[in-house]
Image: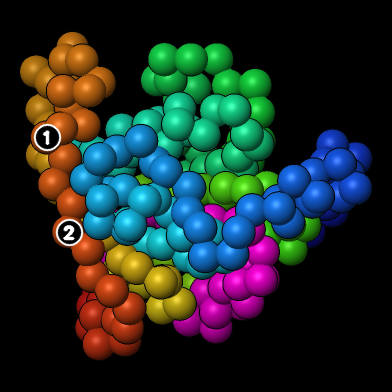
Amino acid sequence: MQNAIQLREFLSERFPRIRLLSELENIPAGSSLPTGITQIDALLGGGLPKGALTEMVQDDVQAGSSLVLCSVLREARQQWVGLIDGRDSFDPASLDFKPSRLLWIRCHEAAQAMKAADLLLRDGNLPLVLLDLALNPAAQLRKVSATAWYRLQRLIEHKSTALLVLTPRPMVSSAKARLFLTANFTLDDLGRPRDQLLSRLKVVLQNKRFHSDEAEWAQAG
């Protein structure tokens, strides 16, 4: 609870509404934020939809979600971005630029990450929020209810904010679109150029609704 209070105080001091909301309100409703990744932007019609949740599922730690995360941050480096790190696993050294407008919230549990997402979306000042739950244990993720996702959707549906959620299994019941990510990178790929790695990403789009998938996963384990 103390961490949540501190985050709320930080947001009110660092991002006064009068300074940023006017910029966001001028963005047309229904528009999107490009990710800089050709496969993703093509599937989503230009990028991450604003006023909505997009889920990206990677069922393998080598599928490339970290590469996607870094690429999205690079593409959005000229605007404020909130990164909620659900497992405190993000490495700033992996970026090929120095972020100056990145709000990095380091969490250790999914519950903490969900509270942080609620606060950032409720505040409404950030055009892009990234919620990384890709490495959180299944036991933690099963405690996140469908209601929690619908609450996040209600918070941004009338705002020009895009929310991308990275997960290891399908679970975001209120997502406007769900992307499945595969790549199967190896250690030999670490030295390859970023553009070459991005070209090897395989992305599949599944539109909403996903209740049967979520119910199946909730019963597993």
Q: Quadrant of the C terminus?
A: bottom left
Q: Is residue 152 magenta?
A: yes
Q: Which numbered dot is residue 104?
A: none
Residue with the mark numbered 1: 200
Q: Is 2 or 170 nearer to us in this picture?
A: 170
Is there a contact, CB below 8 Å, between mark 2 and mark 1? no
> Quarter-wise, where is residue 99 in the image?
top right
Q: CA distance from mark 2 to mark 1?
A: 13 Å
* Residue 200 picture location, percent across and down: 12, 35
195 over 10 or under it: above or below: above
Regarding residue 181, the answer to whether it shows in the image is no
Q: Is residue 81 left or right of residue 141?
A: right
* Residue 192 picture location, percent across and down: 16, 15
Q: Amino acid at mark 2?
A: Val
Question: Measuring 41% from the left and 78% from the top, which residue is drawn there?
Answer: 173
69 over 164 or under it: above or below: above
- The magenta region covers 146-169
Q: Is residue 179 left or right of residue 158?
A: left
* Residue 36 picture location, percent across and down: 36, 35
Residue with the mark numbered 2: 204
Q: Is 141 or 199 nearer to us in this picture?
A: 199
Q: Is residue 118 magenta?
A: no
Disc 2 secondary structure class: strand
Q: Amino acid at mark 1?
A: Arg
3 over 31 or under it: above or below: above
Q: Is residue 41 left or right of residue 206?
A: right
